[in-house]
Amino acid sequence: MSPSVQEELAVMDDDRIGTTVETLKRGILQNLRYVVGKDPEFSTDRDYFMAVAYTVRDRILARWLATRRNYVEHNVRVVCYLSAEFLMGPYLANNLLNLNVEDPLRQATKEMGLDLDRLIEAESEPGLGNGGLGRLAACYLDSLATLRIPAIGYGIRYQFGMFHQEIHDGWQVELTDHWLRNGNPWEIRRPQQSVDVLFGGHTEFWKDSRRNTRTRWISASLVKGIPYDTPIVGYGSGVANDLRLWRSEAAESFYFDKFNSGDYDGAVAAKTYAENITKVLYPNDEVIQGKQLRLEQQYFFVSCALQDMIRIHLAGGRALETFHEKWTIQLNDTHPSIGVAELMRLLVDEHELGWDQAWQITSQTFNYTNHTLLPEALERWPLPLFARLLPRHIEIIYEINSRFLKAVREAFPGDEGKVSRMSIIDETGEKFVRMANLATIGSKHVNGVAELHTQLLKNELLRDFYDLWPHKFINVTNGVTPRRWLAVSNPEQAKLMTSKIGNSWISNLEQLKQLETYAEDSAFRAEWRKMKHDVKVRLAQYILEDGGCSIDPGTMFDSQVKRIHEYKRQHLNVLYIVTLYLRLKKNRELEITPRTFLFGGKAAAGYAMAKLIIKLINSVGEVINHDPEVKDRLKVCFLPDYNVTLGQKVYPAADLSEQISTAGKEASGTGNMKFAMNGALTIGTLDGANVEIRDAVGHENFFLFGLTAPQVEATKSAGYQPRAIYETNPALREVVDSIANGQFSHGDRDLFRPLVDGLLNSDPYLLFADYQSYVDCQEQVSAAFHDQEKWTRMSIYNAVRMGRFSSDRAIEEYCRKIWGVSRLV
């Protein structure tokens, strides 16, 4: 090879991995021409975004391949995180931070006449999750790579993600999320590693070479699982782990014989059926077809993941008997729990291990994270549906259940009530398969996600299992990554903190405690206030340009952004807003702390009451925002299409964080952590991680109200009568009547009748019981905000005492308490 060719190849390699301004410029132009296929003079911001993204990906791929080689060479134990959702958010800005290439890339794009911030805004967000569950999974992947923990995330590559939300006449309207419309530069398709997934049919017995009876699954349909890999790069670690998402495709997408005979629908029927499985995130499961599709989705990606692990394991020359030594699997909530039965099927049927040995491997491989205290959210599948779709798995589940219940009867003789409650099969009426029971039985460890949540699992939801296996239950309080939720989303605050203590806090959030002394420094408090104002101006400008409200950055930004659900009690917040409004209407001279109430969140498409709550928020806002008598003192804004991108703008700008769920209903919450990390003060109940956040930031820096979880249960047990509270609290009665009488619905008394009647007659989430405590606590909030020196001090303490709520700490606890894995040296 001539020296000139060698030099050219060296330059090409440098253009792929170099991080100088010149190599980045060359890399962008090469990718623009040879990957995007455009000349600079004809390129749009979207074209340049793609070119920049491919240039950044080039730098990641070198780390990705080196990481894989390292894992093979060191024969490490690998964490496999199974989740039906991965709400990753936009990649570019986060990757720039973790690679430490933002500064040279910013300079490179500037010299090319480009605005890097505009290119970052051009990225489509993958909507592959509907809330905290998927976002937690994303934070954990970030921390796993940052901490150099060998890991793979497994999930579904939904063609259409969580719906886009628009607001029409105050109502939520769901539109298709075409997140793949412009392509995804971060992923690599790997069809050569596809797997087959079976559905339906029947089973039959056969004899193996040793005359042992075996079972064969004769399926009715077969679907191909195609993996798409996305590298997840750690902050400053040099490690890039793998997020492997699976797309469903037909084994045979077109049948010429059916086409030629005129059966045009039949010619593509297999393709349609197969592709529907990963078409859209979480279909509405109110109808039986929705339930079936959701079960198909869950089984599909879990089967793909387990087959993939076994392939990698055997390709490494390892015996399948050592599977649990090489792999540890975390079930992110109940959705992937079918994996317990699927791994048993693969080991027993496909690889001919004995039952006892297969169960030993399975029960030492899986671990189960429970994320909900709502019994209705624990997945149960109608037995006929389950048996029809997964005939072999129902046989395996029956066998697991039979052996398990025998052990229960031995441990608790004569307690058939306990046997009935712990059975995987619910036989109290229509028969169901209880997936949480399967996950608990088949896992080595079961963990809650906040101290209160774990205690409630032990004492209530999974009490019977805790009685049998107390050693199984462990708490790991959730955490969020400070890279995404502080360094990327709030550069103003990050810059201020770094100016005092350096930037090592980005990978060790506990170091922020060094800033505690600055809370008592009046000069630093002034800097903090200016920083916070600048961030609020940024959000106000975005909201105005996006066609929303015109809001005053000088007002208190009172924020509640999260999934819309009755237990999260956005409507309690609305009751307080109406309370303030009615006070002002009675007394125009009343002095109040000016507030801008910011709401955001999506209601599940089939959740009528949650959609009505959105309508109520917007209807109350319409009246208040157009009333000149309360101008500049109250404003209500609903921010449509809430997602990670919008969250990165809202969390940094919030003054007050509304964490007001009914005590005992929220497993943990992570929005509460993001708000506090960004200096917002919390008003909240003793629910989920609020308890631990309050202890961490100081009780004096947290606004507490409402019943505790034991008080909630006691109130319900005593025969809760919400109408009696309504009758004896004049302020509450006036608020409820104003909604019922059509004051916020153009005189329509029927619009909000379902919501009002529900509160008066049942109020399952105890809004009325907590109303007065909430209103009184909000008065404390107003008084504190009026004293800006005091408020700023409290804000600083909230931000700098949030170290233990980093996802890095959570992952280290999982490694130590549950997975038994260590960092790659």
Image (cartoon, rainbow, N blue to C red):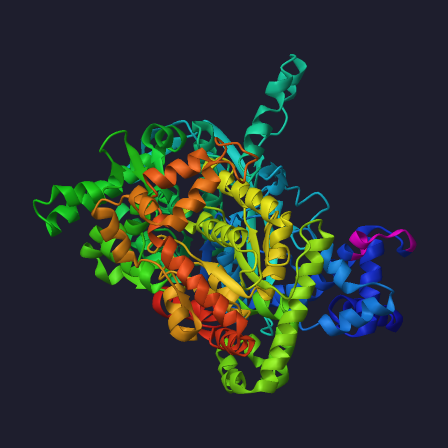
Q: Relative to residue 77, is residue 188 drawn left or right?
A: right
State which region is magenta: 41-48
Q: Can the viewer see residue 462 in this picture? A: no
Image location (x, y in percent) of residue 319:
39, 56
Q: Can the viewer see residue 550 in this picture? A: yes
Q: Is residue 397 above or below residue 643?
A: above
Q: Relative to residue 713, is residue 698 drawn left or right?
A: right
* Residue found farthest to the left: 414
Between 601 and 589, which is closer to the camera in this rendering? 589
Q: Residue at x 64, y 83 (%)?
A: 499
Between 745 and 680, which is closer to the camera in this rendering? 745
Q: Relative to residue 614, is residue 405 drawn left or right?
A: left
Image location (x, y in percent) of residue 177:
63, 42
Name the image quarter holding the N terminus: bottom right
Q: Residue at x 50, y 66 (%)?
A: 782
Asked if residue 42 lies in the magenta stretch, the reply is yes
Between 120 and 319, which is closer to the camera in this rendering? 120
Q: Quadrant of residue 52?
A: bottom right
* Residue found farthest to the right: 41
